[in-house]
Amino acid sequence: MLDQYAVFGHPISHSKSPRIHSLFAEQTGQQIHYVAQDVPAGAFKAAADTFFAADGKGLNCTVPLKELAWQYAGQLSVSARKSKAVNTLARLADGSILGDNTDGIGLVRDLTINHNITLANSRILILGAGGATRGILHPLLAQNPAHISIVNRTRHKADTIVHEFADLGSLNSCDYADLTSLQFDLIINATSASLSDELPPLPDALLAANGYCYDLAYANKPTAFVRWGKTQHARKSLDGLGMLVEQAAEAFALWRGIRPETGPVIDLLNREREA
């Protein structure tokens, strides 16, 4: 019987994770079975219990389950503990469940390795102060940027995150009204606005010359934020497809002890959506 893996989420029909992990397994010669399962928040614990009781080896968790997965895990990685969100669960040899958050390292690898973007000493702005921001902050701060600013419609949510992560690097919060006098080398959209093809209220001249824009969301067509980045003459304006593949590779490596090559998978998925 093949080792069993799954991604839980609600909704989940759009997920590319089964395709990505099947490509990883084919590339590395691993014998696994990976499926997508629609699991609402209220059903998460029972579904996870059932999955692991049936000898399931690992789960990915997406919206709206990452905080619930954080509570479910018996052990937590450093990134998961700081972010208070888990996107990867692994059953260890002793039967305990390890929770990890691979989103941030997936983002950093896509930025630095796939796109050759230098994060050290850079000025970074993150739009939004939800779980997506929590998930990426620890690995981003480990790259030693000059500072990271977090902007959110409700300032106190950004203030809370700044307080919790202040020991890891230079962080501050701000309102959208504050952005008119600021410039950044990298702007990351961690809001859900792209899901409805909307854009946060961003002033012109916010992006520094030769700056970059990155949307954590991905779609078959450029998101509103990716389009905005292009109008601002970003050196690159990117969506989160590369991050999706990179975070999946981190989860695969945690589960299987081998890290697949991500470049060919990203190239294939990009060709497919362009077609």
Image (spheres, rainbow, N blue to C red):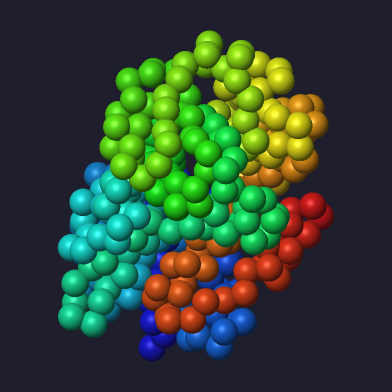
Quadrant of the frame with the N terminus: bottom left
Horizontal side of 116 relative to 59 (left or right) equals right
In this view, which residue lies farthest toward the top?
Answer: 177
Total numbered labels: 0
Q: In this picture, is 202 found above or below 95?
A: above
Q: Residue, x 49% and y 48% (percent of image)?
A: 144
Quadrant of the frame with the C terminus: bottom right
Q: In this picture, is 15 found above or below 183?
A: below
Horizontal side of 51 relative to 204 (left or right) equals left
Residue 216 image point, x, y percent? 56, 43
229 or 248: nearer the viewer: 229
Horizontal side of 267 relative to 262 (left or right) equals right
257 or 270: nearer the viewer: 257
Q: Residue, x 71% and y 18% (percent of image)?
A: 204
Q: Residue, x 53% and y 11% (percent of image)?
A: 177
Residue 222 image point, x, y percent? 72, 39
Q: In this picture, is 249 found above or below 225?
A: below
Q: Quadrant of residue 263?
A: bottom right
Residue 203 image point, x, y percent? 65, 16
Q: Quadrant of residue 73?
A: bottom left
On the question of residue 93 being in view, the answer is: yes
On the question of residue 221 being in view, the answer is: no
Q: Residue, x 42% and y 36% (percent of image)?
A: 170
